[in-house]
Image (cartoon, rainbow, N blue to C red):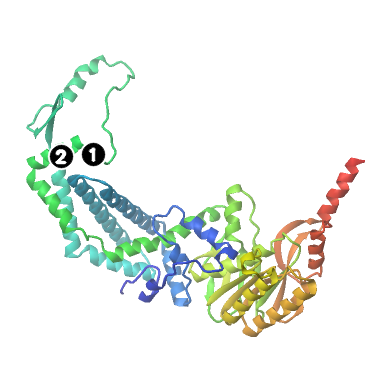
Amino acid sequence: MRFYSILFDQPEGVATCASEAPEHFTDLHLDRVFDAITAGRESDLKPFFYTPLHDLEAVRYRHEVLRDLENADVLTGVVTFTQRMRRMRQQLAQVAKLHYQYQKERWFLDAVETYCEAVSALSETLARLDTRSRGLQAFREYLASYSASEGFRALVAETQTLHDDLARVQYCVQIQGNRVTVSPYADEADYSAEVEATFAKFKQGAVKDYRVRFADWPEMNHVEARALEFVARLNPDVFKALDQFSADHRDYLDGTIVAFDREVQFYLAYLEFIQRFKSEGLPFCYPQVSTRSKAISAQDTFDLALASTLVPNKSPVVRNAFFLQDQERIFVVSGPNQGGKSTFARTFGQLHYLASLGLPVPGSEAKLFLPDQIYTHFEREEDLTTLRGKLEDELLRMHDILEQATSGSIIIMNESFASTTLDDARFLGEQVLRQIIALDALAVYVTFVDELTSLSDSIVSMVSTVIPDNPAERTYRIIRQPADGLAYAAAIAEKYGLTYESLSQRIARRSIAR
């Protein structure tokens, strides 16, 4: 089994990573999600999150790796490996900052030693554990072969020998005024130990420690550097070997192992991110993904970006469910404003995008479609530089989407054409929905025009609900039921301050005034 990548089941996948975020990221708040996931990570992981998969086998490949990483021993071994590799890079970065030759070479030796420890430990860990994913099995075989290679074993042996030789170097430093003398160690007595032993009998209880500690910052001063040169002259063979080691092993890093270290952090970062939600009882699942069936569903799902702001504040996260069956393709979502309609639309898009990355999705179970592209059409501020009105700009963006979309696409429209009249919004909505129906694409259409829900049998009505006894209080639950015909009326009432909540407040103020 040949190893190409821990992220891609085929070698060409590695070369296709995108450098920029897809256009729908901002609308779906995926930019916030992936900013949070990659925050504090040393490696640039965002290109992996910018690159959705379009092949079911590639999705299964990642699911397998993630299931292996659910094994605590496997996860610990991989995390420890990445931590050591990070320390190695920090040591190499320190080499570049230092000025004195021998100090730079010693830090380089430490970096190589850290690398050898990381590789050897991970190889031993994977060899004794039952990993079942194709990705980790192939990497385990690669790592075993690399670790047993003559080149790596020689590197380990040479590194250890040189480390031990340097550890055995001993010398004496005599300071007299401004003069510093470095000489070989000749079994001189340790006077500090003798002085401490002599005065130990006078010690009574806790006393102040007057000893001065040497500074522990990496850089040496010129006196220390000069003393080190004298030490090197006293031990020429060891320091000559250090010089030679640094020259011979500049390219000690194995490209495949370095790539694995970066790629595997894609999984680690996501698993660490979702653990904060799982610990609060929010479920995640491996979705069933298809490129053919559009009978999709999800249970107990939620907006991951919204949950990221609610969970730290111990605020409840409302979970929703949906399904499409047979010839159903489009959700038309209506209901009162601020009732969770836009959140539902974003959730729908997030689920399908996360599934296309081969990642677990929010929810207890999910059956999702693997799209060729996700298109979003959300309300935006008018751009005065284009010299176009808001409606014209919306129509142009919608035209571009319909020109590019296919039957394999997902289209998410949120409050489109809200800037126009009811009749125009109904007319434009009908025209757009008929084209989406003709494409046979999956879609979510958030609107205040309830009549659009009865346009076709392929449309399913979803409604945001309120507390029956208090219409001003939203449940944020989106349920599958016929539209009640009040969405537009509610929008008008809110616009002119005639909602139940507004009227209640005004009546209360008038009562107090009397």
Q: Amino acid at mark 2?
A: Leu
Q: Secondary structure at mark 1?
A: loop
Residue occupying the point 82% across, 56% down: 497
Residue 224 visible somewhere in the drawing = yes
User: Can you give x and y, in whole percent of width and height, for residue 504 in the image?
Assistant: 85, 51
| Pointer 2 with pointer 1, Cβ within 8 A | yes
Up-down: is 318 above or below 65?
above
User: Can you give x and y, in whole percent of width and height, for residue 221 in the image?
Assistant: 23, 37
Q: How many marks?
A: 2
Quadrant showing the N terminus:
bottom left
In this orientation, which residue lies closer to the viewer: 141 or 107? 107
Q: Secondary structure at mark 2?
A: helix
Residue 299 visible somewhere in the drawing = no
- Residue 449 placement, left or right of 92: right
Up-down: is 284 above or below 227?
below
Mark number, residue 228: 2
Query: Would you identify the image quadrant in which residue 452 lies?
Result: bottom right
Query: Would you identify the image quadrant in which residue 447 lies?
Result: bottom right
Q: Amino acid at mark 1?
A: Met
**Residue linked to disc 1:** 220
Query: Would you identify the image quadrant in which residue 195 lies?
Result: top left
Residue occupying the point 78% across, 67% down: 487
Q: Residues within 10 Å of mark 1 (few under 14, many from 20)?
A: some
User: Can you give x and y, in whole percent of width and height, for residue 88 in the image?
Assistant: 29, 52
- Residue 196 placement, left or right of 34: left
Q: Residues within 10 Å of mark 2 (few under 14, many from 20)?
A: some
Structural distance between the alpha carbons of marks 2 and 1: 10 Å
Return the residue found at the far bottom: 438
- Residue 326 placement, left or right of 221: right
The mark nearer the N terminus, 2 or 1, is: 1
In this orientation, which residue lies closer to the viewer: 117 or 69? 117
Quadrant showing the C terminus:
top right
